[in-house]
Image (tube, rainbow, N blue to C red):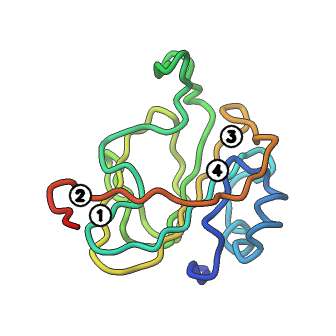
Amino acid sequence: MTSVDWSKQHCGVHQAPLDELLALMPDLRPVLETFPDEPDAYTWDVKVHMLMPRQYPCVPHWHTDNVPRVNGVQRFDLCRPELPMYLWISGAPLTQFKHGYLQAGRWHRFNQLDEHRGTAAADFCWRGFIRATHQGIQAPRPTDHLRRHCQVYLDADTYQW
């Protein structure tokens, strides 16, 4: 498995082309060299999280990614399930798909209709998340791609201040 010190990375990138991802986060090159498809055909999202127990690095409820919205309403009829997305995570907490949990350190192919959810951290940890979205679904944004922060979700049933 490729080793990246996630504690030394930016918070990530948002909707970046490959060259911008590599310029902003060059330590990810060894992971990207294992990508199973043509990397220039994808838009890249990276999120880096420092987590505490019971924190979620992503939405803890079943959801899908990159479903188009028209006037704030998700339009599943506009999805392109024939175009792939790929997901890679560095380690726990693992992302759960309907068919099971992702294996850390490996690329997982999925599409806009594949439901998944985040799971809570059990320990204090750093976690890296990489999603590649085919440019037929989402083209790179023509703006600053450096992610300034990453959302962490809390378990509303056990959260205390």
Mark toward the viewer: 3 or 1: 1
Q: Which residue lies furthest to the left in this view?
A: 157
Q: How far apart are marks 3 and 2 (CA)?
A: 32 Å
Counting other residues with Cα less than 10 Å from the Cα at mark 4, is it few (<14), some (14-19), or many (20 or more)? Answer: many
Q: Which amino acid does label 2 sit on?
A: Asp
Instruction: State the mark number for residue 132.
Output: 4
Quadrant the N terminus occupies? bottom right
Q: Distance between the residues labelled 4 and 1?
A: 23 Å
Q: Where is residue 129 in the image (x, y as percent from the top left)?
A: 53, 62
Q: Which amino acid does label 1 sit on?
A: Ala
Which element is circle 3 on? strand
Q: How far apart are marks 3 and 4 (CA)?
A: 7 Å
Q: Residue at x 57, y 60 (%)?
A: 149
19 relative to 93 in the view: left or right:
right
Q: Position of residue 26 (x, y in %)?
A: 77, 73
Tell me if label 2 and label 1 are in contact, CB under 8 Å: yes
Q: Name the residue under label 2.
A: 155
Which element is circle 1 on? loop
Q: What residue type is labelled 3?
A: His
Mark with earlier residue (3, 2): 3
Q: Mark 3 points at which residue?
A: 134
Mark with earlier residue (2, 1): 1
Tell me if label 3 and label 1 are in contact, CB under 8 Å: no
Q: Name the residue under label 1.
A: 120
Tell me if label 3 and label 2 are in contact, CB under 8 Å: no
Q: How far apart are marks 2 and 1 (CA)?
A: 8 Å
Q: Residue furthest front?
A: 161
Q: Which of 6 and 135 is in front in this view?
A: 6
